Image (spheres, coloured by chain):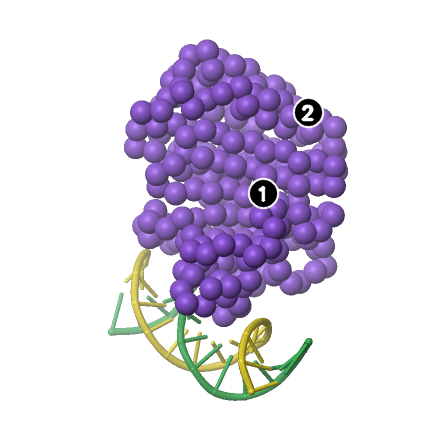
Chain colours: A purple, B yellow, C green
Amino acid sequence: MDGEHDTSLAKKVQVMEAEMERLYKENEKLSFSLEVMTSNCRFLHAYLQGKLTRETAVAPVAAAAESGSSEDSNKRARNEVAKTKISRVLTRTDPGDSSHVVKDGYQWRKYGQKTTKDNPSPRAYFRCSMFPAGCPVKKKVQRCVNDKSLLVATYEGEHNHAVIEAPNGFTDSPDCTTMASTTNSHSFLANINFSQPNTTLGLALPPVHEESTSPCHDSMDNNIIEEYVASLAKDPNFTTTLAVAVARSIVTLPHSTQM
DNA sequence: CGGTTTTGACCGGCGC
DNA sequence: GCGCCGGTCAAAACCG
């Protein structure tokens, strides 16, 4: 790992920790998400300082994901997940709105709905219908058990065609805030992509492969983190989504077999 | 009329 | 082997 870059990143993580502490005190409702965020930042901090290995840093984070998410419970730890690309998107909607509409730029056809054991909200199943000849992508949409105003969309597979609508389809409504985190078995990449009327920011943790330790890191990471922390401080109405988004993005960091 | 949604039935994996 | 559960199918209803 690149020592100088990691030191800088570690400082940023410290700033994030401090900011999260402040937000924690400000908003009781966010306690769960912020606990996860703070915990994850500490593990990442320790990891960056070399106090933890990749495996020990990721394991508690994964455990936090399990405890915070109603879906993908014990039995869902089936190994097919590692093969296909899995993305998870959180979308804030009107809590009274019972629809499962997550505008992401693609056209979907609903093929089923189920009420799952650990979440009273029904889960809807969609297939991509933009390319009927065989787009393999599926989507599951279910309301978050902890926050009914959050829609959790889980995408499986990759589109084999172009998107029709604008790629930033996440910005479909003024108060729609979206987090996307993408994982697969070969990358170590977490993306947060928020869109608010006056706020757009992102955080990307670069892939950490043994053959690409430092060259791919650049100063953009630090700038993005600074922007992210600044926006956390400025926009109290945005904290819920940010908290959940950051927690989700961190906890979905995939395992890597190499440090 | 064609595409989409709804919803009960069915299937397969998993734990006991 | 049985029951539970998540995921999918398919027929009917719905809609533009």
Q: x, y (%) of residue A99? A: 64, 63
Q: Residues within 10 Å of mark 2 (few under 14, many from 20)?
A: few
Q: Quadrant of the C terminus of chain A?
A: top left
Q: In the picture shown, does residue A230 fall above or below A28? A: above
The answer for which chain carries disc 2 is A
Give the vertical position of A217 relative to A235 (above or below): above
Q: Residue at x 74, y 28 (%)?
A: A234
> In the image, which disc is placed on residue A230?
2
- Which residue has dot 1 on it? A179
Compared with residue C2, is residue A3 higher up or lower down, i.e. above or below? above
Q: Which amino acid, mark 1?
A: Met
Q: Is residue A74 visible?
A: no
Characterize the local packing of mark 1: few (<14), some (14-19) or many (20 or more) Cα atoms within 10 angstroms.
Answer: many
Say which amino acid is labelled 2: Ala
Circles 2 and 1, Cβ within 8 Å, touching? The answer is no
The residues tagged by marks 2 and 1 sit, at their Cα atoms, a distance apart of: 18 Å
Q: Are marks 2 and 1 on the same chain?
A: yes
